[in-house]
Image (cartoon, grey):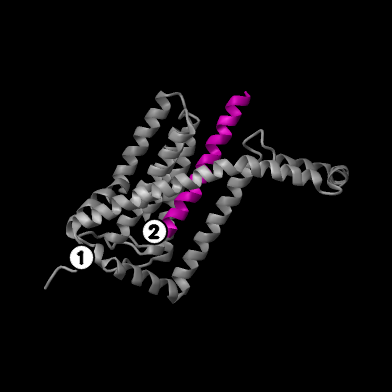
Amino acid sequence: MSDPTLSFWWLLGLLALLLVVGRLVAGLVWWAIRRATPATRRAASRTGRALPGRRFLADTLSARFPRTSAWVAARFATDRFTGLPLTLMVILAGYLASLGSDLAEDVIEREEIVHFDAHVNAALAPLRNSDLLHVFAQITHLADIPTLVAVVLVATAFLWADRRTTYIPGLLLTVLGSETLTYVGKYAVDRPRPDFLTFASAITPSFPSGHATGSMAVYGFIAYAIARVLPSTRLRFELVYWCGALIALIAFSRLLLSVHFTSDVAAGLLVGGFWLLAGFALTEYLNDRAVRR
């Protein structure tokens, strides 16, 4: 009986093509955003000035509710991190938390997500070439607990040596918060693993994926810490894209090795993303406070 899986070199070429195409698409989107941002700001500014009664309404609210108006204005200030940047981070973090909560509820209570996960796992069967599985086994090891601990320790040492100690609390918050929430979720939901269809296996419950969480939290924060000191936007874009590609490959490795369902990986990325934003917020707050001293 012939092997139903696809050729290793064909699959490897397809993977390389996806990464290159993804890089081109991401570059075009980033270029479009950069081109559109100044015009959007000017249009928003003109629209705001043209609104009838805008100044009268603002003055009236400030006179009647001075403390509330001052607090709202501070939340939208663009000259400090605790203004608009933090407001947007809180909104995004709340959205990620809502998505994660809904996903966990669906996994527990609804059959549709279970059927979807099973279909995706079955659809990956042609990609489970034995040689490709060994490649992705090495990729998945990049988010094993011992590897992540070593990476965090090395990153902490570099930040300390570079006198960027304000980044260390954010890194630790991101890692400890994401891992704690992940393992609480695992044993609270207690979802069984998919059938182990390859040589890979695992002993903890399936939901959410600890590898997806850890890769998002650790490598995402390291990319942020490096990007903050890079001299050009182009270099920052390249760093963020290829770090995102690494996180995506680690997440996909859990599916290909048949040790997680799709919803497990999605939930892990959401958990990691939530705590990554928390780490960003703490770091930017500490940096802002250090500058203002």
Q: Taken as a whole, is the magenta stretch helix, strand or loop?
A: helix
Camera-nearest label, 2 or 1: 1
Residue drawn 34% across the image and 38% down it: 151
In the rendering, at what x and y percent does residue 30 appear? 50, 44
Of the 4 image quadrants, the one containing the N terminus is bottom left
Q: Which residues are magenta?
A: 266-293
Q: Quadrant of residue 75?
A: top right
SS state under label 2: helix
* Separation (CA) of disc 2 from disc 1: 23 Å
Q: Point out which mark residue 70 bears.
A: none
Q: Is residue 260 left or right of residue 162?
A: left
Q: Is residue 250 left or right of residue 217?
A: left
Q: Residues within 10 Å of mark 2 (few under 14, many from 20)?
A: many
- The answer to which of marks 2 and 1 sits earlier in the sequence is 1
In the rendering, at what x and y percent does residue 271 appear? 46, 53
Q: Point out which mark residue 5 bears.
A: 1
Count of numbered circles on the image? 2
Q: Residues within 10 Å of mark 1 (few under 14, many from 20)?
A: some
Q: Are marks 2 and 1 in contact (CB under 8 Å)?
A: no
Of the 4 image quadrants, the one containing the C terminus is top right
Q: Point out which mark residue 265 bears.
A: 2
Whether residue 147 appears in this view of the structure is: yes
